[in-house]
Image (cartoon, rainbow, N blue to C red):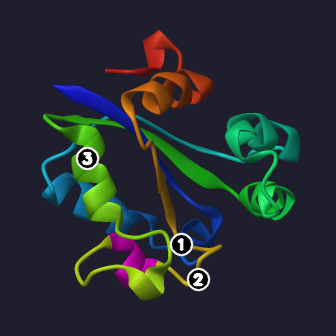
Amino acid sequence: MERTFAIIKPDAVERKITGKILEKIEAAGFTIVGMKRILLSKEQAMGFYYVHKERPFYDELCSYMARSPVVVLAIEKANAIADWRELMGATNPADAEEGTLRKEFGISLGENSVHGSDSPESAAYEIPYFFNALELV
């Protein structure tokens, strides 16, 4: 089993489609081992997205992630990282394949409804950023 990290982003939570996304996650064979709805401060978002701090979209991304609640998830299955990336689809919903979460639910490149770890190293950083060991089952 492999674990990865996911976020249901503000645009999806605001549109009340969290349940639809969770249903698709479970239908794809993932087990949710940690989940909570939180409101990030801009500082927390900046810490989480520190790898993008030199990019021109960094401030906008952090403001967006702090504008309203998100749902953070630790999910598990064999090949979880690659399978989650595939289920999410391309970053830009316009480029995402049919059947992916971003194609179905994403609004734009900036508001693409979901986030996911892109490697075992990022999952190892991102999961404990939001969950302690007692919160993972």
Residue 1: x and y in percent read 16, 25
Which badge, 1 or 3, is on the more N-terminal residue?
Answer: 3
Residue 87: x and y in percent read 27, 62
Residue 72: x and y in percent read 52, 43
Kind of element beneath mark 3: helix
Could you say which is closer to the camera, residue 12 or residue 63?
A: 63
Residue 108's disc number:
2
Residue in the image at 26% along x and 56% along y: 25
- Dot 2: few (<14), some (14–19), or many (≥20) neighbours within 10 Å? some
- Dot 1: few (<14), some (14–19), or many (≥20) neighbours within 10 Å? many
- Answer left or right for 102 relative to 10: left
Residue 28: x and y in percent read 15, 56
**Tags 1 and 2 touching, CB below 8 Å:** yes
- Answer left or right for 57 relative to 85: right
Could you say which is closer to the camera, residue 130 or residue 92?
A: 92
Res 85 → quadrant: bottom left
Residue in the image at 80% along x and 42% along y: 46
Residue 82's disc number:
3
